[in-house]
Amino acid sequence: MPDKPGLTSHLNLNVRGLPISATLGINERSHELIRQGRQIFKLGLGQSPFPVPEVVVNELRINAHQKDYLPVLGLPELRTAVADYYHRTQGLHFAGEDVMIGPGSKELMFILQLVYYGELVIPTPSWVSYAPQAHIIGRQIKWLETDASNHWKVTPQNLSRLCASDPDRPRLIILNYPSNPHGYTYSNDELAAIAEVAREYRMLVLADEIYGEVNFRGDHTSIAQFYPEGTIVSSGLSKWCGAGGWRLGTFAFPAELQWLKHAMATAASETYTSTSAPIQYAAIKAFQGGPEIDEYLIQSRRVLAHLSDTLVSRLHAAGFDIAPTHGGFYLFLDFEAFRPELASQGLVDSVALCEQLLNDTGVALLPGVAFGRPLGELTVRIAFVDFDGSAALAAASALPAGQPLPADFSARYCTNCVTAIEQICRWVAGFSTTPPG
Ligand code: GLU
């Protein structure tokens, strides 16, 4: 008699065979290698290098005793603080009731995809988890072609072409900028043009603006300014407030999309119940802002901009085709210029490339394929976060305001990141000088 299939074969087919998320996978692998005694440059997981601002940590201390379950949509005072934050920073008119708080914006995105019935539209490259979430839920995914020379941005032409192929199909587009994985952002004109297409085809826009506050120039604009009726604005504490592990995300809904918020509340109430109470109380302070938060953001942007520029110019000098970025803490690097040398070593895809780099140099990165790029493309994501953010912030604050940081700032305070990039540059140079055979 043939063996009866075990219970494992009854796994949901949408989950069967899926690995854990690439970002978490590379983080756990890096820690394992460090435990084994390897020196690893942790440029895999995109975790903010900065500490949570002291004023926010203090609020958490004060509220450690908060033990009650909170309303599923979130603590009313926090929801109001988030609405006020959008009014203050973007001129957007949300009321506290329009805001939903969740245990990370990632969870809110999953629930949104669960309750909304439509095709997911995302540019390639996009953050690693949008597509797997759609896959788990069983939604269709349409990747929008982009162009490296246009900073991998969505264009109204491409979007319009995709929508015109089936104009009535319900669609959710996720627009994330400054972008994870490439650090580029959109101009107001570009946002307005995308908004026009979204409006024409009644698309739902999820504006993932979690890196908005770490736009280097501090002039992030929400696409909700151009398409308020169809945009949900997503953010959280993870990237601009250094609190990824606190797990707090926010969605702000326009009046027209309250039905989605209600459906999400139902799904949330039957799954995670509510977001951690002490974290919600502490988050009020973060969204209310104030001089300490302003100073924290100014110095965070200053450090990240300097580091990004330093890394980009070193990579450029080593022969990579890469332009300065606009925000966040990522670079998306293409090794195409070195393809013949890499191919001669048997490295013809982004996974093999990252493996070999990790093995030879200790630099942990993620392959472009994890972000929806073709496997054979030699792209990788660099998360330039392996440095002591507290020391870097303190050093930047001690330098005269409003002036560029000294040229050697990143080499002094973000040493691991600069060393890792130098390792990459030396690694490719080594291949170019190695005689074939
Ligand atoms: N957003 C971060 C990244 O792309 C990490 C968080 C996550 O993936 O859950 O690396």
Image (cartoon, rainbow, N blue to C red):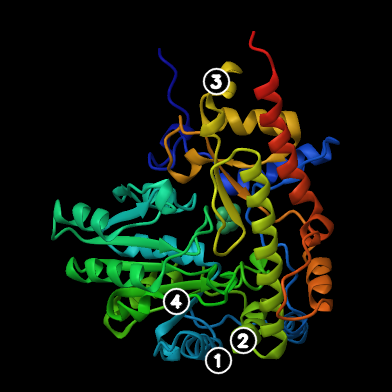
* Amino acid marked by disc 1: Glu
Amino acid at circle 4:
Thr
Front residue (pair 221, 290): 221
Q: Is residue 25 left or right of residue 158?
A: right
Indicate the secondary structure of the residue bearing disc 3.
helix
Looking at the rendered image, the disc whose residue lies closer to the viewer, 4 or 1, is 4
User: What residue do we see at 67% from left, 78% from top?
Assistant: 298
Q: Find disc 2 in the rendering and name its residue.
A: 284
Label 4 element class = loop
Q: How many marks?
A: 4
Amino acid at the residue labelled 3: Ala
Q: Earlier in the sequence, mark 1 or mark 2?
A: 1
* C-alpha separation, residue under disc 3 versus residue under disc 2: 52 Å
| Mark in the foreground, 4 or 2 | 4
> In this view of the protein, which residue sits in the foreground, 46 or 348?
348
Quarter that holds the C terminus: top right
* Residues packed near mark 2 inside 10 Å, few (<14), some (14 to 19) or many (20 plus): many
Callout 4–callout 1 Cβ contact below 8 Å:
no
- Left or right of 162? Residue 239 is right
**Mark 4 vs 2, N-terminal side:** 4
Q: Is residue 118 above or below residue 315?
A: below
Q: Amino acid at mark 2?
A: Ile
Q: Is residue 401 above or below residue 343?
A: below
Q: Is residue 437 above or below residue 173?
A: above
Residue at label 1?
77
- Ligand 1 found in image quarter: bottom right
Mark 1–mark 3 distance (CA, rounded to whole Å): 57 Å
Is the residue indicated by label 4 positioned so its CB lies within 8 Å of ligand 1? Answer: no
Q: Where is mark 4, residue-wise? A: 221
Residue ID for mark 3: 343
Identify the mark nearer the N-term, 4 or 1: 1
CA distance for labels 4 and 2: 22 Å
